[in-house]
Amino acid sequence: MRAKKNAITGLMTQLIIIALGLIVPRIMITNYGSDTNGLTNTLTQIFSYVALLEAGIGQSTKNALYKPITEKDKDGICRILSVSRKYYWKITKYYAGVVILMAALLPFVLKTELSAKTVFAVVFFEGMSGVIRFMFTENWMQLLMAEGKGYVQANITLITKLLTYGVKIVLACMKVNIVAIQFGFFCVSLIQLAIYKWYIKKNYGWIKYDLKSYENFELPDKNAYVLTEIAWTVFSSTDMILLSILFSTALSSVYSVYNLVYSNISGLMNSVYTSLIYLLGQTYSESLRKYEQVHDEFELMFMTGAAILMSCCSVLGIPFVRLYTKGVTDTNYIYIYLPILFGLIQILSWDRYVSGNLTGIAGYAKIVSKISVAEAVSNIVLSVILAPKMGLYGITLATAISLLFKLIYLTYLGNVVILKRSIRKSCFKIIAYLALYFSISFAFVIKPLAIESFIQFILYGVVTFLFVSLAYGVVAYFLDRQTFKSLIKRVGLKKKKY
């Protein structure tokens, strides 16, 4: 019941966020121009680097909480949360220092037409929102996720997102200074803190933070998770930063518009995934044999879901961008092959999600962290080589190529080393889905859809989704018939506990 509640709440929340998230960038582009939009999106990427100061704490906290939560060990929960908060508080002061340093340096590093004072203020308020989050709410969020209360986090996220987008839309339409918009975002982070504090006090009043009693306790594999998170953030954030430095924030804005579509769709899937992921952790702690079935169902569900959604995006990507940027003339937004590359990146990423999670809960974080570093380095090297010659295409192609390394390794590690079985079934699914994805995508590059309005876009979208879902459903059935039937039965039964 809790799993379904989490999934439905997370899905509905993300749909609302996506709808609002599509409105705000459009308003920013039309009212402030591509330069300002590119700047704000680049800063978001840069601060994902700064957030590496807390890298690994959240993942190791959540994984460590599964066992005491399953055993209803309140003392164990308090021990882990106490140590986790100690780490979070320790890095917060460093985070604040880095924020100030970045605010002073970035106005002279980024190629933007905005004044140095404006860039400084925008960077400062963006960073201070992170200070609030790391010092207080991150610790509580890991507890809620590990316990399977993702629906609580989803509801709080919805409230704060509605406030954030409301502030941005109102102020942007008034064309106030971009600094005022960023300050409004900071104020919303304070409201979010108040909501979390009220909920935790009401429902977890028994939690005690006693550092003296747990001073010798360490979060398991924390350093390995730190290295993995650093590598992943470098890997995923390189593109827009390189574009802003090598080319311009305007070209970064082009990237952000395409990324907006795919990150929102990925966020939609992630809202379901994160609301159910506690099942993997808790099931693994109970029985490896029982876990294997749940693992296969998760893998089939999210591999198929990613392939379906990304195929739809590759078909409808260019028509959407044409409609979305209509009237914007300060830079070219149409790159016909970008939707295919962006979709490929998401498919390769999601194909390894379940196996990647397994390696973490099975204690292979240290080994995986080294592969993550290799992946990040290869992305940077390939991006630097390909970007000057191929521009946006080079940046995205480098990312897609680099993703293959870790996908292959995690698929092998999860199946052969941990689950002690053949890798064949997983590989067949990956190859078959990629083949179908490219077939659908290039067919519509040769003969693109002629869409002139958003109403027409929605109609085409529904038809495309149904057609693509049927195609992948047939492939999934023949590739893994037993798991397909098990998954359909699992989702369809109302009384059976997941």
Image (cartoon, rainbow, N blue to C red):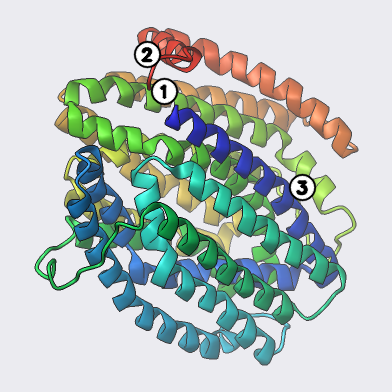
Residues at marks 1 and 3, CA–CA distance in whole angstroms? 30 Å
Q: Is residue 248 visible?
A: no
Asked if one can make out residue 240 in the rendered structure from this viewpoint, the answer is: yes
Which class describes the residues within 10 Å of circle 3: few (<14), some (14-19), or many (20+)? some
Query: What residue is at 15 percent from the left and 63 percent from the top?
Result: 218
Which of the 4 image quadrants contains residue 382? bottom left
Of labels 1 and 3, earlier in sequence is 1
Query: In the rendered image, which residue does mark 1 sit on?
Result: 300
Residue under the point 71% across and 89% down: 115
Q: Residue at x 72, y 74 (%)?
A: 181
Q: Amino acid at mark 1?
A: Leu
User: Do tag 1 and tag 3 residues touch (Cβ < 8 Å)?
Assistant: no
Q: Nearer the viewer, mark 2 or mark 3?
A: 2
- Residue under label 2, please give it: 483
Give the image quarter of residue 415.
top left
**Residue at mark 3:** 321
